[in-house]
Image: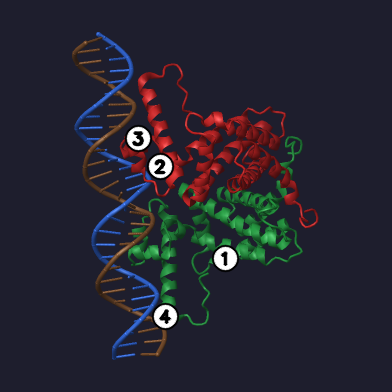
Chain colours: A red, B green, C brown, D blue
DNA sequence: GAGGCTAATGACAGCCACTGACAGTTGACA
DNA sequence: TGTCAACTGTCAGTGGCTGTCATTAGCCTC
């Protein structure tokens, strides 16, 4: 959605991209080092030697800058689902797309930040009420988009059959539980994330059944 | 949390409660009639003949006023889950608590608004990005609280066993899909809501299994 | 390579949500 | 009834965000 003009970069485009990336980098740096609320937009703009007004020309708001990194990986995830072979069962397609997404995370964000910074930013999101709210809303939008993809794959009408939305919503719920545990825990490795994701997905079935007390 | 002083109302308490309710009523009225964004806090305060500062003494922010009505019913839902007989399976307890919640919705909010107003407010929430975000965050908090309740019921550790959180998250996901369809559809009756809830809960299993194409 | 076109920017003014501080008012209670 | 504490209004200020307009700086043509 940003790199749709490969024919000729042009000095103008270059500068724009550069300003955008610098603003994003400055924002993420400030957010992760001193916190989201304690960082003002003026501060970010000043760090890049740009007017505050310009910041708002590149980002719809402070929130958007905070969620931009995550947005990159989410976009790739959606594409990943779309690219899955049609014969795969819905939930399996989602699972594979996520696992692949984790594996290729570093190359997705390399031009902006490191994986470590990505993780730190994630923690900021999770611990800042406004950001968490915005994050959840975006997740909801993503789920909606994916529900449409799945429905199309299976030849169903999203608005008539609740199963696509339900499946995606359940999947999203699992992902959120996983994210939280990931943030809270100590294992920051992508490998750990993959494992956690798999384990939680396998636990959905058991969780929905009764008697948790029997099999601990 | 508000009516924890039944012994002696006192003129002061009365006035406070009255101001609170009037502010809430005015806010909901303005939000539903002219929209959330197009309503300023000054407007709400003025409608009750109170300074803007006072509004912020009763509500943490504009958002809180917009979500207060919903908060009442959510609170009752959590209590409902807590009151469920211990022998019930987790998911069954949640289901019953929600269904009961819908049935007693009108008496829960009668002192503030009608069921119709409640529904209209819900639509405003769903169609206003900031409010939707805040709503989702609150839902997440609610889910966390309920996960703890369930874990305690079953004698588990919420942080060690992912099943309570997973079950609640899945349940929450179903509820959100239901809400959305409820808002979008034409059947505003509580009875319709009960049916929709049941139907969707029954569809979770099928949605998670593969081959949607076989059984439509 | 000079000049015109247009996109990008900066500077300024202003709205609105929200907060801290201080003073005035009004129930509560001896 | 007078004292205390709670509730409220006023004022000033911060920060996110937007509209407007003049200025700058790529780009493209002749």
Query: x, y (%) of residue A46?
Result: 32, 38
Mark 3 packing: few (<14 Cα in 10 Å), some, or many (20+)?
some
3D distance between C-alphas at marks 2 and 4: 45 Å
Picture quadrant of residue B22: bottom left
- Element under label 4? helix
The residue singled out by tag 1 in the image is B106
Front-lying residue, B137 or B208: B137
- Element under label 1? helix
The residue singled out by tag 4 in the image is B11
Is residue B128 among the parts visible in the rendering?
Answer: no
Tell whether D18 sits left or right of B174. left
Residue visible at 63% across and 46% down? A173
The residue singled out by tag 3 in the image is A48
- Of mark 4 and mark 1, the one earlier in the sequence is 4
Tell whether A195 sits left or right of B71. right
Query: x, y (%) of residue B110?
Result: 53, 68
Residue visible at 34% across and 63% down? B53
The residue singled out by tag 2 in the image is A61
Mark 2 packing: few (<14 Cα in 10 Å), some, or many (20+)?
few
Q: Which tag is nearer the camera, tag 1 or tag 3?
A: 3
Chain bearing mark 1 = B
3D distance between C-alphas at marks 1 and 3: 55 Å
- Number of numbered discs on residues: 4
Chain bearing mark 2 = A
């Amino acid at each position: 959605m940003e790199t749709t003009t490969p024919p000729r970069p042009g000095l103008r485009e270059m500068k724009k991209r550069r300003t955008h990336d610098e603003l994003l980098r400055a924002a993420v740096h400030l957010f992760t080092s001193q916190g989201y609320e304690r960082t003002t937009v003026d501060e970010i703009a000043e760090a890049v030697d740009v007017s505050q007004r310009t910041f708002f020309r590149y980002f719809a708001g402070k929130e958007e800058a905070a969620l931009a990194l995550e947005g990159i990986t989410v976009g790739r995830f959606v594409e990943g689902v779309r690219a899955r072979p049609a014969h795969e069962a819905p939930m399996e397609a989602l699972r594979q797309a996520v696992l692949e997404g984790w594996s290729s995370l570093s190359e997705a964000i390399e031009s902006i930040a490191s994986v470590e910074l990505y993780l730190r930013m994630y923690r900021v999101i999770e611990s800042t009420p406004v950001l968490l709210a915005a994050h959840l809303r975006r997740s909801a939008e993503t789920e909606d988009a994916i529900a449409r993809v799945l429905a199309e794959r299976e030849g169903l009408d999203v608005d008539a059959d609740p199963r696509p939305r339900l499946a995606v919503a359940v999947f999203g719920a699992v992902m959120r539980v996983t994210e939280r545990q990931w943030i809270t825990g100590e294992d920051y490795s992508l490998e750990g994330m993959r494992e956690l994701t798999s384990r939680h997905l396998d636990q959905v079935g058991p969780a929905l059944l009764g008697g948790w007390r029997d099999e601990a």
